[in-house]
Amino acid sequence: MARSPSAPITVYDNGDLKVYPDVASACADLEVYDIDDLTIFDGQGYRLRVETHGQSVTGMSIAADIAPAASDLEAKLKAFISQVGPDRVGLPDVEAASLSSALEALLRFFQS
C-alpha cells in the first residue's frame, strides 16, 4: 500500500517557497497551470506529484520513482529563511536547525 504524504507540505518555486499545514491546504492554493514549475515535498522530504481533475488540484501523492530528498528540502528551507530573515521567521540559529525545526518555524511564519 502506498504511503500518504506527511505534513507539512512545502511548495518550492525557483527560490520562493510556501509551507502548508496539510495536503488539502496546499491543493486549495495551487493553480493547475503552475504545477509544472513547482517542486513539492512532504514533511519527510519525499517529492510529491500533484493530482488534478480538469482545472482543479485534487490531491498529492508520493513520487515513488524519485528518491527522498530531505537534505535538498532542508537546504531550500534554510536558504529561504536566511533570505527572509531568521529572526523574522523565528529561527535565529537557522544553520543549526533541523529539518523539522525549519518546517515548524516556516509553518508558523506563513500562518501569521
Image (cartoon, grey):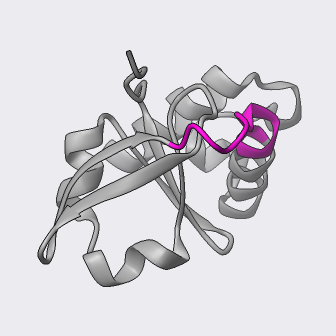
Q: At 40% from the left edge and 27% from the top edge, which residue is drawn?
A: 7
Question: Is residue 112 in sight in this rendering?
Answer: no
Residue 93 appears at what percent x and percent y? 81, 31
Residue 36 lies left or right of residue 75; in this view the side is left
Q: Judge whether residue 66 is colored magenta.
A: yes
Q: Is residue 8 magenta?
A: no
87 displayed left or right of 40:
right
Q: Is residue 85 above or below residue 45?
A: below
Identity of the residue drawn at 50% across and 35% down: 42
Q: Residue 31 or 111: which is nearer the viewer? A: 31
Span colored in magenta: 63-74
Rendered location of residue 48, percent (x, y): 49, 46
Of residues 68 and 21, the one nearer the viewer is 68
Which residue lies at the image location 39% right of the left edge and 80% below the top edge?
34
Q: Nearer the viewer, residue 52 or 35?
A: 52
In x, y percent, where is residue 54?
Answer: 12, 75
